[in-house]
Amino acid sequence: MAYLDAFVRRIGSMMHIEVQTGRGRMDLIVTHNQRKYIVETKIWRGTHYHQAGKRQLARYLRVEDETEEFYVVFDHRQAPEPRIETEIIDGVTIYCYVIPVVQAAPSNV
């Protein structure tokens, strides 16, 4: 988050982490040019969990009176597949980014 925070500050914006809402907490809110960008982050745990995260974000957005936002999923599987998806759920546009996170196995030394 430190790298993202540095970037957000450099462009004159603000980042808020784990913001309380009427329906729980939002992972990340970035305000830029008087606009609010809501970002939900998850770790890949399968298709069902992935779709549930999108529905969760759509509920947050309706409460916050927003119509489009971002869903970032970190995929730690053995052979992760990057994806970019755009989906409309209950009138809300979700921009989804599945980001492969490939980590080398620790050595036995």
Image (spheres, rainbow, N blue to C red):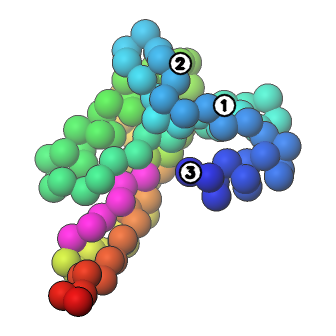
Residue 1 is tagged as 3
The residues tagged by marks 1 and 2 sit, at their Cα atoms, a distance apart of 10 Å
Tell me if 59 is positioned left or right of 45 in this view.
Answer: right
Do we see residue 93 in this rendering?
Answer: no
Marks 2 and 3, how far apart in space? 23 Å
Please tell me which residue is depicted at 55% across the width and 18% down the height of the picture.
Answer: 65
Q: Residue at x 39, y 33 (%)?
A: 57
Question: At which x and y percent is residue 50?
Answer: 24, 49
Mark 1 and mark 3 in contact (Cβ < 8 Å)?
Answer: no
The CA distance from mark 3 to mark 1 is 18 Å
Main SS category, magenta section = strand
Report the quarter where the C terminus lies.
bottom left
Relative to residue 41, is residue 19 depicted above or below?
above
**Which residue type does callout 3 highlight?**
Met
Residue that label 1 marks: 36
Q: Residues within 10 Å of mark 3 (few under 14, many from 20)?
A: few
Q: For the residue marked with disc 1, what is the amino acid? A: Lys
Q: Is residue 28 visible?
A: yes
> Residue 46 placed where, x, y %?
15, 55
Residue at the spot 43% in from the left edge and 52% down from the top edge: 72
Residue neighbourhood size for the residue with mark 1, other residues' Cα within 10 Å, grouped as few (<14), some (14–19), many (≥20): some
Q: Position of residue 12 (x, y in %)?
A: 85, 43
Indicate whether residue 31 is drawn in magenta. Answer: no
| Residues in magenta, as a range | 72-77
Q: Secondary structure at mark 3?
A: loop
Q: Residue furthest front?
A: 109
Residue lying at 73% horizontally and 48% vertically, measured from the top left:
8
Q: Which residue in the structure is indicated by mark 2?
A: 64
68 horizontally vs 56: left or right: right
Asked where in the image residue 47 lies, by quadrant, the reply is bottom left
> How many numbered badges does the structure rendering display?
3
